[in-house]
């Protein structure tokens, strides 16, 4: 057996200016493999930085643009139909990616505000929370269902797992404010009247009766459970006259964080509605001040 | 691999360092603006809707 010294010409004296000796193929192979592994590790780290921070920056810009466009639209006078001079919301004809409402969650801070856009494609959700097509619009009977990212892309729904029952979700449209409150959670339903239900914020919130008995404030479901955004969640078979349907709002996001194994779902119910006063445009509903 | 690239960079040391930094920046930009946005929707991290 030859010693390492003899098999490796590099160990011989190398004078100044001398060319590196012929490479040992095994050594070259190992070095290149190692370098490739290190490179792969760095690329994956870079991807994490991209996913968690860079997409946030990109989305923040897009959300800002969407909000500015919506504000412009709300400020511009709408042609008034003389037969119907009332200030009513019109949501029909919204195109994919068009902003139509803002959502505020005061417990997440006074500055928590996102423009909700029509549709739930990847491109739309990059801009902000997206409204599931063919579900109700704000204030309507049925289920106003909205999806949002939880990691990166502005992560509007980052903390919705922290929403407590009765926390307000305030949806602002052109002419109105709609105050939804998170429904009782599964473990609170039984003792609601004497337990959490005595909280002053819970005045208008109570477990919903049939056929809504399975609708609770928070649930974690498989991604295949599309029935969570049905007009009567979990009851695709329920025949409820549209005008008799409860006015619900549903938020969906991924769960656990950084995974798409499941979906975190929050259900809320409409408790109050405020018309915006055209004479006093800066007025905001008192629920917006519930910041703690 | 990196040694091989380094030995092929022309010019004196300062120029080589600068070229190397530019190369690294180029690769990062390519990843950030082309590769990651393309691959991201295909990965199971960020699906938030139900079906």
Image (tube, rainbow, N blue to C red):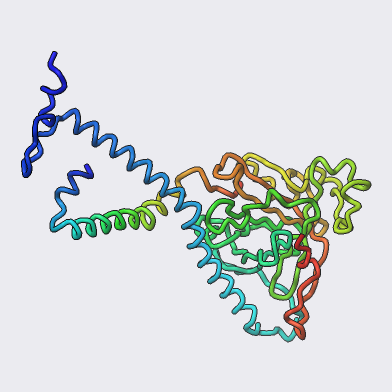
The spot of residue A53 in percent (x, y) is 49, 56
In this orientation, which residue lies closer to the viewer: A20 or A26?
A: A20
* Side (left or right) of A150 relative to A281: left
In this orientation, which residue lies closer to the viewer: B2 or A250?
A: B2
Count of labels shown?
0
Q: For the point 14% across and 58% down, which residue is it? A: B12
In this orientation, which residue lies closer to the viewer: A70 or A78?
A: A70
The spot of residue A291 in percent (x, y) is 75, 63
Q: Hey, which residue is sitting farthest top in the picture?
A: A1
Q: Hey, which residue is sitting farthest right in the picture?
A: A194
The spot of residue A193 in percent (x, y) is 92, 48
Q: For the point 65% across and 42% down, which residue is it? A: A225
* Side (left or right) of A5 relative to A78: left
Q: For the point 21% across and 32% down, which residue is it? A: A29
* Side (left or right) of A172 relative to B1: right
Q: Is residue A242 visible?
A: no
Pick the quarter of the image with the N terminus of chain A: top left
Q: For the point 78% across and 80% down, which residue is it? A: A277
Q: Quadrant of residue A75?
A: bottom right
Relative to A187, does residue A201 appear above or below in the rendering? Answer: below
* Side (left or right) of A35 relative to A119: left
The spot of residue A88 in percent (x, y) is 74, 75
Relative to A23, does residue A84 appear above or below in the rendering? Answer: below
Pick the quarter of the image with the C terminus of chain A: bottom right
Q: Is residue A111 visible?
A: yes
Q: Quadrant of residue A210?
A: top right
């Amino acid at each position: 057996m030859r010693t390492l010294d003899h098999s490796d010409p590099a160990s011989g004296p190398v004078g100044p200016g001398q060319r590196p000796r012929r490479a040992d193929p095994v050594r070259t192979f190992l070095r290149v493999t190692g370098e490739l592994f290190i490179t792969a590790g760095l690329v994956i780290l870079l991807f994490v930085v991209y996913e968690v921070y860079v997409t946030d920056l990109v989305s923040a810009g897009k959300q800002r643009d969407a909000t500015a466009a919506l504000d412009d639209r709300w400020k511009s006078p709408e042609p008034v139909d003389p037969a119907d001079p009332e200030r009513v919301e019109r949501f029909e004809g919204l195109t994919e990616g068009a902003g139509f409402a803002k959502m505020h969650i005061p417990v997440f801070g006074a500055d928590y505000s996102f423009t909700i856009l029509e549709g739930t494609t990847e491109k739309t959700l990059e801009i902000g929370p997206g409204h599931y097509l063919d579900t109700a619009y704000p204030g309507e009977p049925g289920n106003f269902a909205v999806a949002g990212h939880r990691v990166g892309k502005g992560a509007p729904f980052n903390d919705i797992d922290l929403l407590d029952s009765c926390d307000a979700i305030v949806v602002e449209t052109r002419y109105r404010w709609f105050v939804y409150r998170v429904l009782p959670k599964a473990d609170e339903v039984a003792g609601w009247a004497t337990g959490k239900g005595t909280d002053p914020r819970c005045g208008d919130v109570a477990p919903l009766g049939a056929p809504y008995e399975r609708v609770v404030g928070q649930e974690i479901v498989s991604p295949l459970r599309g029935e969570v955004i049905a007009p009567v969640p979990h009851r695709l078979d329920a025949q409820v006259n549209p005008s008799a349907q409860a006015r619900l709002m549903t938020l969906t996001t991924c769960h656990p964080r950084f995974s798409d194994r499941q979906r975190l779902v929050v259900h809320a119910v409409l408790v109050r509605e405020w018309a915006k006063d055209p004479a006093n445009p800066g007025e905001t509903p008192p629920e917006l001040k519930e910041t703690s | 691999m990196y040694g091989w690239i380094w030995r092929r960079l022309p010019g004196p040391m300062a120029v080589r360092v600068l070229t190397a930094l530019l190369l690294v920046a180029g690769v990062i930009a390519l990843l950030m603006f082309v590769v990651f946005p393309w691959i991201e929707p295909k990965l199971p991290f960020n699906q938030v809707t139900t079906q």
